[in-house]
Image (cartoon, grey):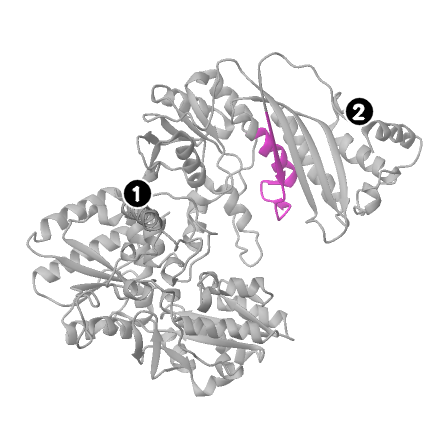
Amino acid sequence: MNMKQADDSFQAGRRQARRLDLKNGRVELTHGAGGRAMADLIDMMFRRAFDNPLLNQGNDQAAFELDAGRMVMSTDSFVISPLFFPGGNIGSLAVHGTVNDLAMAGARPLYLSTGFILEEGLPLAQLAEIVDAMAAAAREAGVLIVTGDTKVVERGKGDGVFINTAGIGRVPAGVSISGDRARPGHKVLVSGTIGDHGVAIMSLRKGLQFETALQSDCASLNGLVAGMVEQAGGAIAVLRDPTRGGLAATLNEIADQSGVGIRLHEHSLPIRAEVRGACELLGLDPLNVANEGKLIAIVEASEADALLDTMRQHVHGRDAAIVGEVIDDPMHLVRMVTTIGGERVIDWLHGEQLPRIC
Amino acid sequence: MKYIDEFRDGERARGLARALQAEARPERQYRLMEFCGGHTHAVFRYGIPDLLPPNIELIHGPGCPVCVLPIGRLDMAIRLVCDHPEVILASYGDMLRVPGSKRRSLLQARADGADVRMVYSVSDALALARANPDRQVVFFGIGFETTTPPTALGILEARRSGLDNFSVFCNHVLTPAAMKAILNVPPGAQAGETLEVDGFIGPSHVSVIIGSDAYSFCAGQYHKPVVIAGFEPLDVLQSILMLVRQLNEGRADIENQYTRAVTPGGNRKAQAAVAEVFTLRPSFEWRGLGAIPESALGISEAYLAYDAEQRFDMVYQAAAGTKGCECPAVLRGAKKPTDCKLFATTCTPESPLGSCMVSDEGACAAYFTYGRFRQEAEQRQAEQRAEHRAARA
């Protein structure tokens, strides 16, 4: 069913009592069948939350004008379990994730699309909470969700809800940010404490539950990036958000892509005491743990201090720090000077992180 | 973190490094074994060798529970879950990836349909048994003296609460017996097969349980000093300094650097629980060290009902390791991981061929993960590839 049909149903629906029971109802197969039930879902669930003129055009696609310049586009799918976690849910994550992928080119994110794959039986109240979180995240990031799609799969064939988002954004003139632009002498900055998201999620996993006041850091970073680009856009070589695989994987990617080495200083890494504690206990390395609201910036040394100041003035960059530098290394290794002054290689994570025995 | 950061302080580390430079006599070599895998891990994680004078050599010992378990014992567990569909095998995570005979691991057995669950403690296994009254839950008990008391308490709890569908596949081993095996140079041993250790960095957590007195044989019988060390980098550095001083003075004492946790007598309550539930096995096979008399625990007569080996008629069959795998020599400290042809070539943490590449505490995994000798390893790999190409041409 397209948005036009949905719109017709929407008009018709106004004349009738609504049948979507947001309090006790559940997703049913009919919600994806293209009929009346689906129109109700689109109307009461999605349009209610995402409400904007482009979406309300009611077509199969959203149409909009663009300024001249370089555009970026990105897509990401979200299958996180549990759906709800301290600091967010799959909905907010789905917006932050794609907004951040766009922002890591220095771009201003403009429009998002979203696709939902719902599992039969998902409580509508939960779906509403997820959709509301998406809407709030989009408002906060200043992006519009302009087109969407819904499918329902039989019970047991999904994990509650899967969400895909895609987005486009515009890159300001004079900005050229890419993973292959790190050069020896550049400084490495992180925008805040690392490992918060991964540890918050781990604390909820079955068989591993532990109590923590820790929240996921899940956030859109386009505001932070906009400030940095304004301050010294030309001096930023690389931006990347260290999600799965953590800082270790992301820095290794950049080292490979740029053909350089990277040296970190352990004492300068911002890590919360709770995260360090949980990692000590479970035998994990915070450098391998996922983040959802942090970025790594590799910048010209002469602008590093000014950029650090700018980052620290933003709510998502308060704990920003300069953590290392790009070096010349034919082996493209990421190394770290440890707190006691030794050195070790920071490699990609091998296999999965397993808690150790004693 | 309070009480942790103090033991990772850079300034103090540099002070200890200076003291070591001054203390170590340039004309001699110091060969010190850190017995415990936890220390091996700490040594590489913090880059401790970078702070040592070149004539102080750290030799990595066999104190890694999954590393020393012989393939034949792992095979027993794999056969158990494959032959008994009623069994849920509850195991620590590390153990799941170790390849057994024909490179088959518990993870592969699970993929083929066996019910293998990763647990974090024996209490998780007890909970599984309570939640699945119609199944048999077998806890894969492995480890040195640190993990033995919890297993003992698990069995005591099962008896107390009448949990009849719970049993333990017991593979608990003893540290002092392994140290003796390392110190006993077998008659007719060739150079390279054995090693000479000048002193031991003693284990942290194991010593909390057994106490520092348990090592007195080292000093008395073998005239080798032991310094029990904490797991933090400053603990390790200070213990090395204490060992170097003993060796310079010709002493062989049991000293305790880890006084904040270790007492001479150890944890008597834990020892009592272990003595109640377990009994000494006359002999036990270790990977790398062979059969060592009185080096492991079995379940005692009074608790045989909780012994999975009895309950399921499990039988041990010795099994050969992967061809070319140097885990045995690495575990004896006779070879370094980089001496193994498989290291970082076909054997990596992603697809380990030997047990030492699986656990964080295994010497091979620590070498690999923290990039020690990476350069040499990659160079050797390139050479091997070139050789291979030349041989084909």
On whether disc 1 and disc 2 are found on a single subunit, the reply is yes
User: Residue B65 is drawn in which quadrant?
Assistant: bottom left
Frontmost of labels 1 and 2 is 2
Chain that bears disc 1: A
Question: Is B225 drawn above or below residue B363 in the view shown?
Answer: below
User: Residue A270 is drawn in which quadrant?
Assistant: top left
Q: Residue furthest top?
A: A68
**Amino acid at dot 1:** Thr
- Point out residue B373 in the picture as x, y percentages from the top left corner: 28, 48
Say what secondary structure mark 2 lies in: loop
What's the CA distance linking mark 1 and mark 2?
Answer: 57 Å
The magenta-colored residue range is A73-100
Can residue B203 be seen by looking at this rendering? no
- Point out residue A73 in the picture as x, y percentages from the top left corner: 60, 26
Question: Is B50 drawn above or below residue B245 in the view shown?
Answer: above
**Amino acid at dot 2:** Asn
- Point out residue A89 in the picture as x, y percentages from the top left corner: 63, 41
- For label 2, the residue is A59
Residue in the image at 50% along x and 65% along y:
B106
- Point out residue A125 in the picture as x, y percentages from the top left corner: 75, 43
Q: Is residue B146 left or right of residue A222?
A: left
Q: Residue furthest right?
A: A15
Q: Residue furthest front?
A: B393
Q: Is residue A81 magenta?
A: yes
Say what secondary structure mark 1 lies in: loop
Mark 2 neighbour class, 10 Å CA radius: few under 14, some 14 to 19, many 20 or more: some
- For label 1, the residue is A338
Q: Residue furthest left?
A: B27
Question: Which residue is nearer to you in this view: B37 or A22?
Answer: B37
Q: Is residue B343 left or right of residue B306?
A: left
